[in-house]
Structures are given as C-alpha cells and as structure tokens.
Image (tube, grey):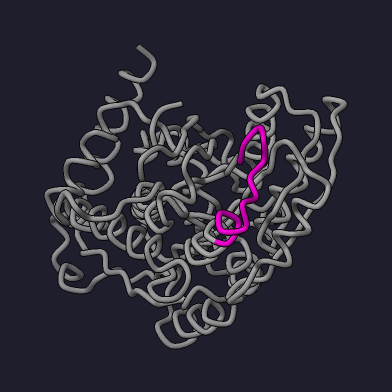
Amino acid sequence: MRRLVLSIVWVSFLAGLLIAGMSVSSQAAEPVVIGSISPLTGTNAVQGLDMKRGEELALEEINAAGGINGRPLKIIWEDTESSSKGGMDAVHKLVEINKVPLILGAYSSGISLPTGQWTNSKKVIQIAEASTSPKLRDIGPYFFDIMGLDEVMGTMLAEFALESGAKTFASITVNNPFGIGIEIWTKKTIDKAGKTWLEAVRYDEKKIDYRAEIERLFAKKPEAVFFTAYGTESKLILKQAYEMGLKPSKGWYADYMTMWSNEVIPRTAEGINGLVIGTTTGSRLKEYQAAYQKRYGKGAKQTAFGAYAYDATWVAALALSMAGSTDTDKIAKALHTVSKIYNGVTGDKSFDKDGMQVTDYYQRRIYRGGKLMPY
C-alpha cells in the first residue's frame, strides 16, 4: 500500500513539475544543459555504455513529458577513459567551458572522489551513479550519491560468506577507495564474528600479470576469498587463478557481480557467489528493462549501473524543475526534497543529510554456465 501511494504521489509530482512549464514560449527553444562523465572507453567501458544508455532513456522520457519547465534537457557526455585523470579532464571541460550547473557520474570512487571534491569547490552539483566509498560522505553539500556505500555491501557480503562455515578468510581488491572500502567492511564483519583474517591483497589496475598477487592471496590457504574487480582485471585475475589451479575451498565471494559477469571467461568464474545491487521487483524496474531492450536490443549487455544512471537523471531533472533555475544552492535543496518522493527503478532514492543514500538493495547470486543465477 505504501509503495502504491508513493507511486501515485510520484506521478502527480512529475506532472506538476515537468508539464507546468510547457506554456513558456520565450525559453522554449533554449535547452537546460547538464553534463555526464562515465567510462566510455578503457577498463570499464561496458559499464560506462550501460550508464550512458540509462541516462539516454531517462532523457527521452523527461523531454517527452515537457522537459525542464518547458525547456528541453540536454546532456553533454564526456569520457573518463576509466581513469581519474580522464575524469578530472572531463569535469574541467564541463564546468569551465560548458558552464554546466550539474554533472552526473562517475563510475568508481577513485574517480568520483577527486572529481567530486573539485566540483564541490566550484559549487557545481555532482551526482555519483556508481561509486560507493564511505569517504564520499565527507565531500560537501554539492555532492550526492545515488548508490549505497560500501559499509552496507561489505557487511552483507561478509555475512553471506560466513554462512559457508569458513573459518579463515582473505581478500583481493583493487587498490583504490572503492576496493579498500570493501576490504575494510568485510574484514570488520569477519573480525566481529571471531573468525580469522589471513591476507588482504591490493592490486593495481591495468597490469598484464597478477600471478604474484594470486600466489600471495592463497599462500596461507584461506577457505573463503572476497573478490573485488572491474571488467578487464577480473577476466585476467580469474583466468590466471584458474590456470594456477588455485581456488578457495569454501568459495569466492564477489561484490557488485555485474562489474565483471559480462566479460570473464565462463569456466574461470564458475561457482562464484556474491551480491548484485538494485531491487529486482517493482513495476518501474520491469518498465525500464522493457524500454531498454526495445531501444538497444535484447542482446545488449546490461549491468546494474544503467538503472542507477537512469534514476540519477530523473532525480536531477526533478530538482532542476523544482529549483526553477540553475542556482546550485536551490538545486541542492531541491534534490533532498525530490529524492524522498521519487519512486526509483532501483528503489527508494532518499538522500540523507550528507547527500548519501539512506538505504539500498542487494540480491544473492551465483555464477553458473556463464550467467548470474539466483542463489
């Protein structure tokens, strides 16, 4: 009943904000321009393309509903090239040349932290779509995050692994704020349960050989291993571990499995347990998935992150409409209001006082036969 009421309120709210301004004639031809940064090339290009598509779907719906008080919304997409330098180049262009008041993105806390700190210093709104480091909470009043932080994911993943009966644990994580955040929270949960943490391996991106890290990971024979990796690195790490005949007796446990599920060699990832993010129920999710397949084809590679990008775009549009201007103080205030009303594809999108998500949703999965299956 509560969800039905929220859906009715949401539809009415959209109609009021987006359609009310359709009679405005003097500004009708002038778009409201915002920016987006995502990894369209590099290690995380699969995820970045999915995010761009989610934003495109939302953009089409927003403009079909009347845009921003009668003005069309326009997004300028910039490529982070899956790197912090690329991300910084992108936000500098969007802010200094395009003069945008709001930026969507990025993917990876290692990019969202430096870009968010800079955009916040310039009083430009940034809404991270796929970044989860707890350090994001401290950036400032112009930074928001549409996805739950690592403290939630790390805790739930560790609780899942504890059910295996394993007594000894280790982890291999990317050496950036995202990976370290997952490592910290899984370890805290394992320590609290009174189990033994043997090794925490942190690896650098874009290497061509991870066998030394894999040997260190398995040297003390952990029964369960936590695995955090982006697409390109996940394919190589799992391939080399498979070739070395190294596998934890109680299994691998991976966070955000759609980061790599489309890219790994199936036999090397067979049987990995883990979590995917995002609600799997609700009429809005079904509508989003149907619209996505119609627009991009049933064979298009989807990750969890496109739906978060879709929600971020809608929340941004609603806040811009409510603010009635590109004044970023007004937009920031409006974001806190609309997030509590908007019925997201990925669930409740309410921001807390720091602009972070109040909650998020996770489902258990196992990788079988080249696909993520319900656990």
Q: Residue furthest top?
A: 1
| Position of 97 relative to 65 (above/below) | below
Q: Residue at x 47, y 61 (%)?
A: 231
Q: Quadrant of residue 282?
A: top left
| Position of 362 relative to 70 (above/below) | above
Count of numbered marks: 0
Where residue 72 sits: x, y (%)?
21, 64
Q: Residue furthest bottom?
A: 97
Q: Quick one: 306 or 205, which is closer to the camera?
A: 205
Is residue 66 found inside the magenta-colored segment of the image?
Answer: no
Q: Quadrant of residue 295?
A: bottom left
Q: Is residue 220 left or right of residue 262?
A: right
Q: Residue at x 21, y 74 (%)?
A: 30
Q: Which residues are magenta?
A: 240-252
Where residue 156 sits: x, y (%)?
64, 31
Q: Is residue 17 left or right of residue 116?
A: left
Is residue 241 found inside the magenta-colored segment of the image?
Answer: yes
- Magenta span: predominant SS is loop
Q: Residue at x 64, y 36 (%)?
A: 152
| Position of 334 relative to 166 (above/below) | below
Where residue 271 sits: x, y (%)?
49, 37
Where residue 121 sits: x, y (%)?
65, 72
Q: Quadrant of residue 158?
A: top right
Q: Quick one: 212 or 301, which is closer to the camera?
A: 212
Q: Residue at x 27, y 40 (%)?
A: 14
Locate the N terminus by quadrant: top left
Q: Quick one: 58 or 303, which is closer to the camera?
A: 303
